[in-house]
Image (cartoon, helix red, strand yellow):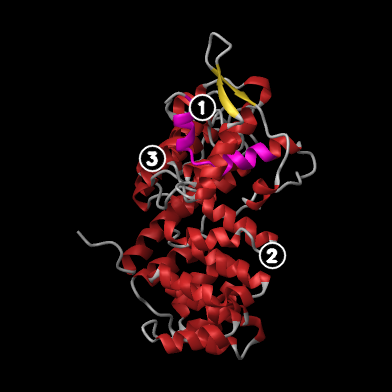
Amino acid sequence: CRRGTSPDLMELLPQWLTAANARGFAAPVQALPALLDAARGRTDLRPAALEFAGPRALWLARLNPDWRFALRATPGGGTALPDLDAPDQVQLLWQEGLFAERVALLAAIRAQRPAAARELLVTTWATERAEDRLMFLDSLRMGLAAEDEPFLEQALADRSRNVRATAAELLSALPDSALAARMAVRASACVAVDRTREEPGLVVEAPHECDSGMERDGVVAKAPAGRGERSWWLGQLVEATPLGTWERRLGGRTPAEIVALPVADDWRSELHAAWCRAAVRQRNAEWSRALLGTPSAPEAGGPGAVSLAERAKLLSTLGGGERAEWVAGFIGVQGLSEAFQLLGVCAVPWAAPLGRAVVDALNIARDAGSYPWSFSGVMGLAERCLDPAEASRLDGLLAVPDESEDAAPGAGGYWAEAFQRLVTTLRLRAAMAEELGELQSP
């Protein structure tokens, strides 16, 4: 259905809430019911909406069953946390509090004093339920450091398989951990430079078994349906191995040189996919660049990024400017048909080169007589993510274009309508930001 030329105000609400919260504004009391109704229908709105609504929203949520989500979404259901400098109060809540209150307490301490949070967790670890241990362990992702290793090593022997797997994942994110070193030894035995050929390449010998040591270090023995066991084990070993291992192991080559090497016996995609996962887990920008390749590569994403989802994850390890530049290059060569997922990881508002690439690609699609509704997702993203300063550049796109014989019927009118809505939305966002005081007047 056609959306007309008016901005979709509900789609702009997340940005408005973020800006209002950044300025320290609070919701007027008369707006609370509508705000809670909006957050009830959209889970992505809830954190910002509840922050803007403040404590009154929790009071209202206790009176209306439709708004009970606010109690569940707020750690501790709105219960005030004790002063973290009052050990007796902290211990009392940790020993006797509800689970949500204890999760909120542990997260608050971890954010300020990582070691103290871990030490508090140790005091009751042996008596916690398995599902609670898993949630508490997950809180250690924040501020993860080498000091957490002894505790995580002990958790590798936990009764719960999920707890063991999480402990192993956290340890593998610490490149100097003993687990990472053990994984590096195992993975290094599987991948080597093939010296029997004139041209250098890699040869892979996947594990023939998953022994108890591998299982203790988080390798899942049973492969999913449709996956070979040996490739399943290999992928897990490589994913958990510090990426610096390969530069030392494979003749001092750079990540880009390693990724460019041919891989024997059809192991290339499996090996590269595991390196992709490792680059994301270890937040390694150099390896991410190597695996992404150039945006103009024939495979439209580099040798290792076998899916748009993997490309998006690799891009997330790069800085905002570099990320936008890569996606702009991708759109310039590949067009918009596969860019939606990649645009979703770019910082808002989009950097000028990315914004120009999107607008140019939309203009090309319009002039080509493409089906306009197939670009509605990107157009919706542009409404929310283009820099409002770009609005003046779009004025030339507001007229109904001449339709070629092979254009979709009525496409010209739809495109003009969509660009009109885009311009109107950008100007509304500029006014919205100015009203909230984000923009300084000249």
Q: Which mark is residue 259?
A: 1
| Labels 2 & 3 near each other (Cβ < 8 A) | no
Question: What amino acid type should be assigned to the residue bearing mark 3?
Answer: Glu
Asked if residue 10 shows in the view, the reply is yes
Question: What amino acid type should be assigned to the residue bearing mark 1?
Answer: Val
Which residue is farthest right?
A: 225
Q: Between 187 and 236, which is closer to the camera in this rendering? A: 187
Count residues near mark 3 (Cα–Cα under 10 Å), then give few for <14, some for 14-19, many for 20+.
some
The residue located at (59%, 68%) in the rendering is: 135
Front label number (1 vs 2)? 2
Q: Between 73 and 337, which is closer to the camera in this rendering? A: 73
Question: What amino acid type should be assigned to the residue bearing mark 2?
Answer: Arg
Q: Please, what secondary structure does the residue beneath circle 2 have?
A: loop
Count residues near mark 1 (Cα–Cα under 10 Å), then give few for <14, some for 14-19, many for 20+.
many
Q: Which of pointers 2 and 3 lies earlier in the amino acid sequence? A: 2
Asked if the stretch drawn in magenta spans residue 234, the answer is yes
Residue 238 vertical position relative to residue 151 in the rendered view, above or below: above
Q: Which of pointers 1 and 2 lies earlier in the amino acid sequence? A: 2
Q: Please, what secondary structure does the residue beneath circle 1 have?
A: helix
Residue that numbered label 3 is attached to: 322
The residue located at (61%, 74%) in the rendering is: 126
Residue that numbered label 2 is attached to: 159
Magenta stretch? 233-250
